[in-house]
Image (tube, helix red, strand yellow):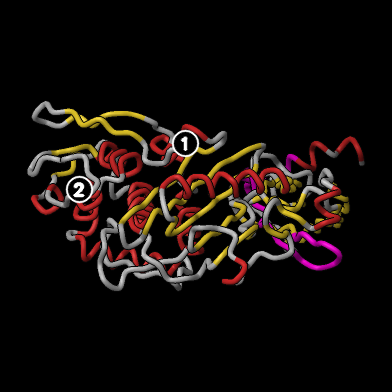
Amino acid sequence: MRKKYSVFFIAFAIMLTFGIFCGFTLKQKVFADSENVFKSKSVILTDYNSGTVIAEQNSKQHLPIASMCKIMTLLLTFEQIDKGALNFDENIAVSETAAGMGGSQVFLEAGAMYKTSDLIKSIVVASANDACVAIAETIAGSEDSFVSLMNARAKELGMTDTVFNNCTGLPKPGQYSCAKDVSVMFCELLNHEDYFKYSTIWMDEISHPKGRVTEISNTNKLVRFYNGCDSGKTGYTSEAGHCLAASAVRNGMRLVCVVISSPDSKTRFAEVSSLFNNGFANYTNKLIIDSSSPLEIEVNVKKGVKDSLTVMPEKSFYLFSAKNVQRSIEQDFQPFDEVKAPVRNGDCVGKIVIYENGVEIGSVNVLAAEDIAEKTYFDYIKDIGDNWGLL
């Protein structure tokens, strides 16, 4: 069953005619060294929902990324919370090692207990090295063991140009990443809704058991000064330069931008803002399949107390495109050969394949949105009785 329709993205005809994307060309995503248009050494701008790369420059170049390493630290922390191995209200003891980390910190007290939520806030808002090590030691027993988890998770995510040697991003030989890999792990972190409870904080404080208070402010200035920016992670060392991974959302489209080794802090924020501006001005993300709404598809069920099944898409599907392009899209629902009761809510019963010009561009599994029990002997007797008058 195919559903065909055209999706028209509002035109910026002049930009299409001249192929100009406000300082860099639409047709050229990768910038050769001789054509660098950014002061940052490594740059990437992607669409979060589709993963489409909008612009990049030296995006796979191996570079130190300073505190952007903490993105992986945070990702593993939220994943442990999802698994139930850690919770936000759990008290974590701070070791002498963690308290003595130095660099950016919130001056945790050695031997004191802090809630997981306060340590996460310290990392997200203030880029606190001491909080990073305290959480790493809690999850894995030691920072070295935690780093092994970081590298294993990077491998799972396909981050082939990344090696972690600590959980903080402090300078250490052999540690590097690239803009593309940072974008991958940051997008994975953005899948955790609880992260945004911390990433949008501008100013706050951390209370210590002995009565001290450490005031903190967000190192990502775009959270306050860029419309739509709700998340990000900065980084700086003399070796890495000024770095930033940030995300912003407007009109349902979320963009993710990473810059590595900017010459100064002002440049990293300016270049990310400029990339966001161009992305929002020239691209759009049309929601084609909405995971929050039942599908208008009839799925027949054999031997069930109901003959048909309400179904939902497993995930949403977005069509990312330049605003001046008309695209013809087809959806084809492909059910399993036979759906038999009993059916459980969440069972996969088929898939929707999305085509453009006859070429598959994506697919979404179709899931049962209700339970349907198998008919019993008494159900069959009832059916006969209900239909008796029709005989």
Q: In what quadrant of the picture does the C terminus appear?
A: top right
Mark 2 falls on what kind of element?
Answer: helix
Label 2, on which residue? 130
| Total numbered circles | 2
117 sits to left or right of 49: left
For residue 249, side relative to residue 124 (left or right): right
Place residue 106 in its image quadrant. Answer: top left
Look at the image and tell me whether residue 380 can be seen: no
Specify the farthest residue to the right.
391
Tell whether 304 sits left or right of 155: right
Foreground mark, 1 or 2, reads 1
Report the front residue among 90 and 170: 170
Q: Quadrant of the N terminus?
A: bottom right
Q: Residue at x 86, y 52 (%)?
A: 326
> Regarding mark 1 in the picture, which secondary structure is present there?
helix
Vertical order, 330 against 375 (above or below): below
Per the rendering, the mark at residue 305 is: none
Residue 207 image offset from top left, x and y in percent: 19, 29
**Residue range (magenta):** 353-382
- Whichever of labels 1 and 2 marks the residue nearer the N terminus, that label is 2
Amino acid type, residue under disc 2 in the picture: Asp
State yes or no: residue 374 in magenta.
yes
Q: Disc 1 to disc 2, how far (Cα)? A: 23 Å
**Residue drawn 30% across the image and 73% down it:** 174
- Left or right: 60 with respect to 372? left
Residue that numbered label 1 is attached to? 223
